[in-house]
Image (cartoon, helix red, strand yellow):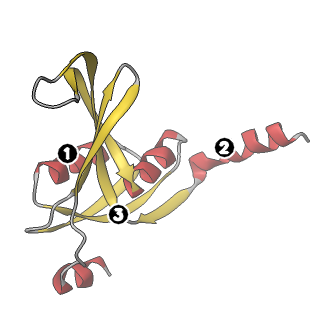
Amino acid sequence: MSALSSLTDLIERLSDARVLCVGDVMLDRYVMGEVERISPEAPIPVLRVERETTMLGGAGNVASNIAALGGGGHFIAVVGDDAAGAEITRLLADLKTIHADLMTQNGRHTTLKTRFIGANQQMMRADVESTTALDASTQSQLL
């Protein structure tokens, strides 16, 4: 049996897999457009935004990949009580083979990584995230 057919067999068997995924979930946002000029305020490019898209990042990307390969399972993570947390909840609900248990910690920022892309080149990334430990109540709920 060739290595390629072995890999194909393993991928096909993933539809029977049930995976527990626990980790840091984040929202990856891509802001894309064209750069046609430099700002008069500073020597930086001006991005004319044409479209935006979001997708699951971090452990959420793992859950998304499991579902895309036909597998299923359980996903556990913590989000903040904010728009990024709500978007993550919506995106996870679209993964029909993944059961998501999201805990919400009030006052915590859901990790959001925004990439600005012009002419297929990433120009900058802006991050919003909490770097403090989860509060005791959330830790207990998570366990």
Q: Which residue reaches farthest top?
A: 36
Q: CA distance from mark 2 to mark 1?
A: 29 Å
Q: Residue at x 23, y 28 (%)?
A: 52
Q: Residue at x 51, y 61 (%)?
A: 19
Q: Are marks 1 and 3 in contact (CB under 8 Å)?
A: no
Residue indicated by mark 2: 11
Q: Are marks 2 and 1 in contact (CB under 8 Å)?
A: no
Q: Are marks 2 and 3 in contact (CB under 8 Å)?
A: no
Q: Earlier in the sequence, mark 2 or mark 3?
A: 2
Q: Secondary structure at mark 3?
A: loop
Judge depth for marks 2 and 3 and give the one in front.
Answer: 3
Where residue 96 sits: x, y (%)? 37, 44
Residue 44, image quadrant: top left
Q: CA distance from mark 1 to mark 3?
A: 15 Å
**Quarter of the figure that contains the N terminus:** top right
Judge depth for marks 2 and 1 and give the one in front.
Answer: 1
Q: Which residue reaches farthest right?
A: 1
Q: Residue at x 9, y 68 (%)?
A: 106
Q: Earlier in the sequence, mark 2 or mark 1?
A: 2
Residue 132, image quadrant: bottom left
Mark 2 is surrounded, within 10 Å at the Cα level, by few (under 14), some (14 to 19) or many (20 or more) other residues, namely: some
The three-letter amino acid code for the residue at tag 1 is Glu
In this rendering, the count of numbered labels is: 3
Residue indicated by mark 3: 24
Q: Residue at x 25, y 82 (%)?
A: 139
Is 113 situated above or below 45? below
Q: Earlier in the sequence, mark 1 or mark 3?
A: 3
In the rendering, which numbered label is found on residue 87?
A: 1
The three-letter amino acid code for the residue at tag 2 is Ile
Q: Secondary structure at mark 1?
A: helix
Is 68 situated above or below 127? above
Q: Is residue 53 left or right of residue 10?
A: left
